[in-house]
Amino acid sequence: MENLPLYFDYAATTPVDERVIDVMVKCLGAAGNFGNPASSSHRYGQQARQAVELAREQVASLVGARADQLVWTSGATESNNLALKGLAQGRSGGHIITSRVEHKAVLDTARQLQDAGFEVTYLTPDTNGLITPRAVLAALRPDTFLVSLMLVNNELGTLNDVRAIGDIVRRHGALLHVDAAQAAGKVAIDLSEWPLDVVSFSAHKVYGPKGIGALYVGERARPLLQAQIHGGGHEGGLRSGTLATHQIAAMGAAFALAGEVQDEEVARIRCLRDRLLEQLRDISGLQLNGNPQHAIPHTLSLTFSGDSLDLSALGATLAFSSTSACNSGSSAPSHVLLALGHDEYLASQTIRLSLGRFTHEADIDQAARAIRAALRPAPFWGVARG
């Protein structure tokens, strides 16, 4: 494990906090809380159910929801699929609005629904990478029944005004789904007040384990949402399958911990972001994608349009992303950057750096040095494009 690159990819996944691991481990092994939460006839199952319901309350508390409004899933990808497919199923057609900069879990699902006969509008972000309420209003049609937009963009960190969008969508009579995987623990969320109908969450963005998530289902959406996984009628009939007590308990612990440290953590990471940008600001042609006034401080998308960046050299010392993890199996440029107007060259000269709970000032300084060391004189055509 020595000589690994410095980790700057917290937007893709975070390490599990040691305090969360302790909760998870206590649900494993013969001496642990290993029972099936659906087995109510004995103490082992009852104890497991108590752990599951405690976790449900912990997750709900962070996002201003009621515990009974949360459905456990395997992560935000499944939550997104359940939201879109579950609200479309049973309809003979209709219109869906999403955007060109969504996570592939939404985009691929929307395209599948297109193949099934639904019409989908893909909104283009403004120059700051935001989907504006005005753009949503202009795209609404009489047959629009669903709008699906992310709260925080996973590549840019930009923060959409989903409250204003939700008001517009609700007045229209449609439902609003929000992918909030990148937002939990970084942005104050209050689903008791916000006009959102279905919201996706994931544990591994909040220093919990991979493979567990949740879907918030509001009162307007619940009668319309249809299960996509059947086999026992678990989770109020919306998601069958034996619950993974250890992962669920860990997600609850991670969300509870996030609520305790969120304000302090966001302020500290904002200072770290500013420190990094200050050390890089004199690099010719450096461009910050998105709008820092409408973004979380944790995620930075940087385009180097002057001198080129040797990504191979940088990767030896710094663990960063050149696209989102959902695109990692493809050599194609980031669909988010293309939607912003970048051509393939500029997209190839863009990196995403993400700061997290375990990032310190020394890491920021090391990252700045690594980026500078990886700069190379740009080819003449690269300079022209800059």
Image (tube, rainbow, N blue to C red):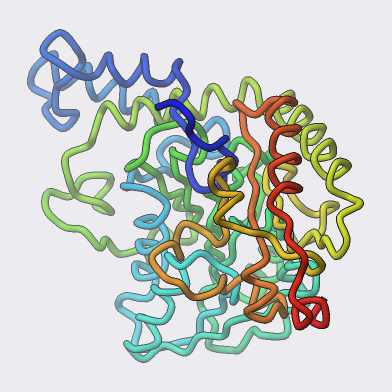
Residue occupying the point 82% across, 32% down? 271
Q: Nearer the viewer, residue 188 or 368?
A: 368
Q: Is residue 95 above or below residue 196?
A: below
Quarter of the image that includes the N terminus = top left
Q: Nearer the viewer, residue 175 or 246?
A: 246
Q: Residue 26's spot in the image, x, y percent?
A: 27, 14
Quarter where residue 112 is shown = bottom left
Q: Is residue 249 above or below residue 292?
A: above
Q: Nearer the viewer, residue 71 or 6?
A: 6
Residue occupying the point 55% across, 49% down? 315
Quarter of the image that includes the C terminus = bottom right
Q: Nearer the viewer, residue 34 or 12?
A: 12
Relative horizontal placement of residue 23, taking residue 243 as reference (left or right): right
Quarter where residue 44 is shown = top left
Q: Is residue 80 above or below residue 62?
A: below
Residue occupying the point 72% across, 25% down? 362
Residue occupying the point 68% across, 80% down? 124
Q: Residue 343's spot in the image, x, y percent?
A: 68, 81
User: Which residue occupies the extreme top position in the image?
Assistant: 31
Q: Residue 109's spot in the image, x, y percent?
A: 39, 73
